[in-house]
Image: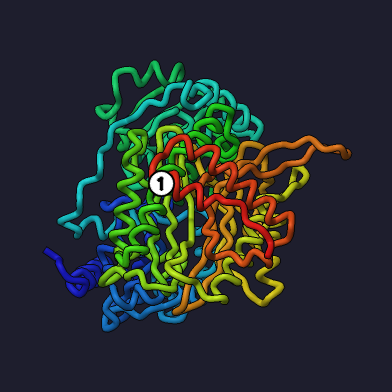
Amino acid sequence: MLTTTEQRLIAIREWLAQNNIDALLVPHEDEYLGEYVPAHNERLHWLTGFTGSAGAAVVTQDKAAIFVDGRYTVQVTKQVPAELFEYRHLIEEPALDWITQNLASGSNLAIDPRMHSAAWLNAAQSKLAGSIELKVLDANPIDQIWHDRPAPVVSDVRLMPTESVGQSSESKRQQIAKLIQQAGADSAVITALDSICWLLNIRGLDVSRLPVLLSHAILHSDASVEFFLDPARLPAEFEAHVGSGLSVFAPKQLQTRLEALTGKSVLVDPAISNAWFKLVLQNAGATVINSADPCLMPKAAKNAVEIAGMKACHIRDGVAMSKFLCWLDSEVANHRLHDEATLSDKLESFRKQDPTLMDLSFDTISAAGSNAAMCHYNHENQPTPGQLEMNTLYLVDSGGQYLDGTTDITRTIAIGQPSDEMMKQFTLALKGHIGVARARFPKGTRGYQIDTLARQHLWAEGYDYDHGTGHGVGHFLSVHEGPASISKRQIDVPLVEGMVLSNEPGYYRADAFGIRIENLELVVEQATQGDFPVLAFESLTRCPIDARNINVDMLTRPELAWLNDYHQKVWDDISPLVEGEVKDWLRAATQPLVHH
């Protein structure tokens, strides 16, 4: 058994020698290219010991390097032995740059095309052209030597009735088939796991925190669909549920079915489909049309049933949050300062009181004091979890996967008395949050045009935060849903009615504190007295924002009015569902604030 990082590295180098290969690239991604990688596909972790959610490693005969982004520069040094791997910054020195500098011209680099997008492969081929040969592997070497590899999770297939999702699979497939026809294609390969589940109105839990099934689909322009999943997993009523035009195949038949598209035009999303699909289709004589997954926009624009579910689950989620924050205040008042793990577990226990909770929507970020300055902190990756201290801030970013929707909320809580500086930064972030929440904008507006509203007050004082302001959220699907976002990145996707996006400005001071205020917002249309109707945001999240952190005199009258109105909505929706000390806490937490 290969139990240490060193033994595993030696085994990879033996494989390199046996196959006359100079270097192997091991990304964090698996063949589904999703954000969440199931344990049996954590190849980078197996090789290096690194548990972060993004990264890559390169192994040559005499060197090895691991590439991580700024979120993980500290973590990587604790998890990966420095005598075996050089540490490199993924953005400042991407793996391909390191390879060109460390491999002699004429060397070769092995890649598994299933672990990279088609767009990445194109870029890599042009970058390495003439100096380093790319060897495309048929089989992944780690899979051949990972003898104690965990078995894949085989979750139950859940059929989502039309009354829960608002549109039958047959209707969705006809809608998407029209888009395939408009693109001039005969078929589309659907590889995004949430797109497949949305299209067929199914859910699973093959991946932690993500209610999907590890599967693939090919949708044809006549609305018929080929679905690749072990048929033994499917309930008897599956075919009737999906409707006419369904064929189910075992996963091992995928290549044969792709090759059957010879002579056809096939739509593939180069950004989110792995390169293997494109290679197989091209070798089979199909014409590949590079185009975005046609399910993305229809999935992002929620229908009335999905919207009702999102609103309902946010109220129940708000009950759990209120119970937790009431408990937390009481513990602190009684000088019981818990650690981050205890707090995270306690919040999860309150969420689990709801029978419709299927899972959390991501690993809770429970960050005390200076740990919150790392915006993707996870206490489980630390030697010991941090502990609450008086006169600091506690940041908790969490969410749930409910049968009727997905939640994602961040609250920054005063533990004792926050400093004037903490209150100032919190209020600057709050002003940005309110700026987005109050925004009204014409149809066609992009997320990056909204992003400035979240940052303007921080910018004016010489501050900023190094993450996006908002990401899309699915309906009992991925908590990070494309294609829209609110960030500095100029993503050319309009915000449309029915989209759900997060609104989460923050501020982070290294080794001191971290602040983030996050609600989910629904894009709605509003009539005006002007020349055209506008779009606006309706806050879905129902949970108080900690008034102890707010310098009220920094808020304008309209900002203060928004905050008091928001807290009134929280009280109206949550108070009938709580009692006793939680209700008393909620009453105090939602009191109107006034200028001094």
Q: Is residue 539 left or right of residue 387?
A: right
Q: Position of residue 577 (x, y in %)?
A: 44, 36
Q: Is residue 310 visible?
A: yes
Tell me: 247 left or right of 124. Answer: left
Q: Residue at x 46, y 44 (%)?
A: 318
Q: Position of residue 103 (x, y in %)?
A: 41, 79
Q: Residue at x 37, y 66 (%)?
A: 25
Q: In the figure, 457 relative to 447: above or below?
A: below
Q: In the structure shown, which secondary structural element does the residue marked by tag 1 occupy?
A: helix
Q: Residue drawn at (55%, 60%), measured in percent from left and top?
A: 547
The crowding category of the residue bearing disc 1, from other C-alpha atoms within 10 Å (few below 14, some 14 to 19, many at least 20), is: some
Return the x and y of residue 380 as percentages of the image width and height. Answer: 29, 63
Q: Quadrant of residue 142?
A: bottom left
- x then y, percent, for residue 562: 67, 50
> Do we see residue 258 in this rendering?
no
Residue furthest left in the image: 1
From the viewer's side, name the closer residue of 12 and 555: 555
- Find disc 1 in the rendering and name its residue: 582
Task: Name the foreground residue: 590 vs 251.
Answer: 590
Instruction: State the residue at coordinates (36%, 26%).
Output: 248
Count of numbered circles on the image: 1
